[in-house]
Image: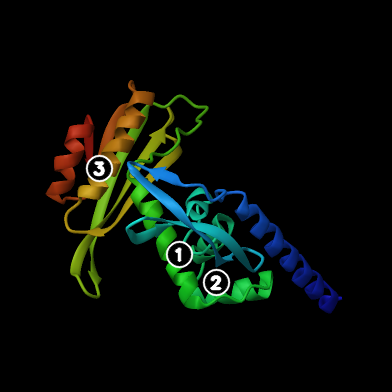
Amino acid sequence: MLESEEKVQVALNEAGSIATGEALKCFDTDGSPIVLGNVTLTSKGEKPKTYQTPYGEAEVFRHVYQTSEGGKTYCPLEQNARIFMTSTPRFAKIVSHKFAKGSSGDVEKDLYENHGRKVARSFLQNLSDMVGSIAQAKEENWHYAAPRINEPIKTISIGMDGTCMLLCNDGYRETMAGTISFYDHNCERQYTIYVGAAPEYGKATFIKRMEREIAHVKKLYPQATYVGVADGASENWTFLEKHTEKQILD
């Protein structure tokens, strides 16, 4: 039975690769000239490219554009279909999810054993790095969705702490973590928002994220009492005293 199931998976993967290849073609142009900004680009013809999908490799002939002066090329299909390197969005999502739980070796083995996909570890690492860099860039403009809390919120505590980490090539850098916790009238915690930042020189990124979350929360709960919680580091209190009415030394 195991052998039969594995043959079924191979067949389904083949069908999935073909179907995904056809789906990708829907995001291509018909070869007509296109305009980007004030620049006109013309197609160099349909060039083959192999894309990584959840089911296997899919080769697609797609239009590649360039200006009359040459230089950098542009592929509308890859832009419109949100291709990551040579990965489809779904495959990039699968790989990123697995990387969140294991090493590159674990992801490589998982894909082969559970999906029938043999993929080079270096590609998986580069793909995960690319997705992570995009998420990190976009995170600066994101904020947490407002929690749905049934109990009336009386107190909101804002806490922060940091520690220095030794990085291989950059020496010591400080990494920060912060919390915004919601308490009801019985002092029972109902929810906590966690905010973090990768090690950096200073706290600029972390402070920016914390201030964005605090401003959002204060619009939702303007009547709550805001309490700061931190250790004795003076720089913590320089920040917390601006945003809280009471302070507690941890």
Crowdedness of circle 1 by 10 Å Cα count: few (<14), some, many (20+)? many
* Residue labelled with disc 1: 128
In this rendering, position of residue 18 left or right of residue 241: right
* Residue labelled with disc 2: 107
Q: Which mark is residue 208?
A: 3
Crowdedness of circle 2 by 10 Å Cα count: few (<14), some, many (20+)? many
Across and down, in percent, residue 79 comes to 47, 51
In space, the residues marked 3 and 2 are separated at their CA atoms by 34 Å
Up/down of 232 relative to 116, above or below: above
Across and down, in percent, residue 8 comes to 81, 70
Up/down of 208 relative to 199, above or below: above
Residue at x-position 22% and y-position 29%? 245
Across and down, in percent, residue 134 comes to 39, 54
Up/down of 220 relative to 101, above or below: above
Q: Secondary structure at mark 2?
A: helix
Please say if the residues under marks 2 and 1 sit with CB atoms less than 8 Å apart. Answer: yes
Residue at x-position 35% and y-position 31%? 217
Q: Secondary structure at mark 3?
A: helix
Residue at x-position 26% and y-position 52%? 161
Residue 60 position by quadrant: bottom right
In this rendering, position of residue 42 left or right of residue 22: left
Crowdedness of circle 3 by 10 Å Cα count: few (<14), some, many (20+)? few
The colouring scheme, among rainbow, by chain, secondary structure or one colour, is: rainbow
Which tag, 2 or 1, sits closer to the chain's start? 2
Which tag, 3 or 1, sits closer to the chain's start? 1
Query: Which of pointers 3 and 1 indicates the residue nearer the eye?
Result: 1
